[in-house]
Image (cartoon, rainbow, N blue to C red):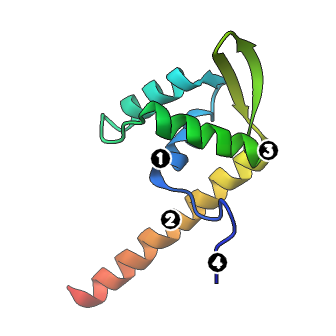
Amino acid sequence: MAKKSMEVLTETMFYVLMAFQKQELCGTDVAQYVKKRTKNRVSLGPGTLYTILAKFEEESLIEETASEGRKRTYRITEKGQAAYREEITRLRQCIADAEAEAKYTI
């Protein structure tokens, strides 16, 4: 069975939504946030970043708030907040499952 679009976020998608939790940002700010937050473990190239931003805008997870030339600023929507919270819940369950499994296999 095919998954619904945006049902599970990739790691990079998750960090992009995380970046918007406290403020509106442009793409460059998002990339810098993710790089700093992950201590360079996750690095977003422009192609990946702007593909994610376009998909998030299309899915109404973020919305554009300002545009100056090529610079566009976005904020997270209520739908985006819900997707972010759902992903945190899913990831917590994954960790709980792994920890439960480790108790029986160690």
Q: What element carries label 1?
A: helix
Label 4 – label 2 distance at C-alpha: 23 Å
Tell me if residue 75 comes above or below residue 5 in the rendering: above
Q: Quadrant of residue 43?
A: top left
Amino acid at dot 1:
Thr
Q: Nearest the camera: 14 or 101?
A: 14
Give the labeled residue for mark 1: 12
Q: How crowded is mark 1: few (under 14 residues within 10 Å), some or many (20 or more)?
A: some
Residue at the spot 52% in from the left edge and 22% down from the top edge: 29
List x then y, in percent, for residue 66.
Answer: 75, 17
Side of 39 where 70 appears, left or right: right
Does the CB distance between marks 4 and 3 fall below 8 Å? no
Q: What element carries label 2?
A: helix
Tell me if residue 85 comes above or below residue 99 in the rendering: above
Label 2 – label 3 distance at C-alpha: 21 Å
List x then y, in percent, for residue 6.
Answer: 65, 59
Label 1 – label 2 distance at C-alpha: 17 Å
Q: In which quarter of the image is residue 44?
A: top left
Q: How crowded is mark 2: few (under 14 residues within 10 Å), some or many (20 or more)?
A: few
List x then y, in percent, for residue 31.
Answer: 46, 29
N-term mark: 3 or 1: 1
